[in-house]
Image (cartoon, rainbow, N blue to C red):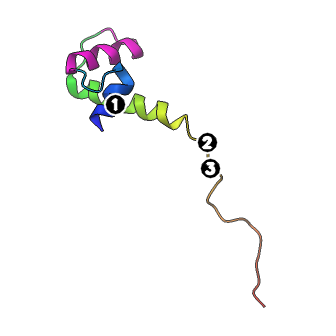
């Protein structure tokens, strides 16, 4: 949710757009002006990347090469 992204990025789930833009630019080292839509997209991508790092990778879902013959 937007509140979760805001909380993860700024520490405040009710952060303003300006606070979000500031944090995105600060964290990612962006110096130029950043449109609101771009800041939102980068914030979501950043938070997704950080949250996915908490989950272990699962094994491949591809079937094994073992042959099973029903008898």
Q: Residues within 10 Å of mark 1 (few under 14, many from 20)?
A: many
- Residue 33 left/right relative to 31: left
In the rendered view, tell whether residue 61 sits above or below residue 56. below
Measured in 3D between alpha carbons, the distance from the residue under mark 3 to the one under mark 1, in whole angstroms, is 25 Å
**Which one is nearer the viewer's eye here, 23 or 62?**
23
| Lower position in the chain sequence, tag 1 or tag 2 | 1
Residue placed at 76% from the left, 78% from the top? 68
- Residue 56 left/right relative to 64: left
| Lower position in the chain sequence, tag 3 or tag 1 | 1
Q: Main secondary structure of the magenta part?
A: helix
Helix or strand or loop: what does disc 1 sit on? Answer: helix
Residue 1 pos. (x, y %): 30, 39
Residue position for label 3: 58
Which residues lie in the magenta part? 16-31
Residue 5 placement: quadrant = top left
Query: From this viewpoint, is residue 37 visible?
Result: yes
Residue position for label 2: 56
């Amino acid at each position: 949710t937007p509140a979760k992204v805001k909380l993860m990025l700024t520490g405040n789930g009710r952060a303003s757009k300006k606070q979000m833009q500031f944090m995105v630019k600060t964290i990612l080292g962006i110096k130029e002006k950043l449109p609101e839509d771009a800041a939102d997209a980068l914030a979501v991508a950043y938070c997704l990347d950080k949250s996915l790092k908490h989950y272990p990778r699962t094994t491949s879902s591809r079937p094994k090469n073992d042959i099973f013959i029903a008898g």
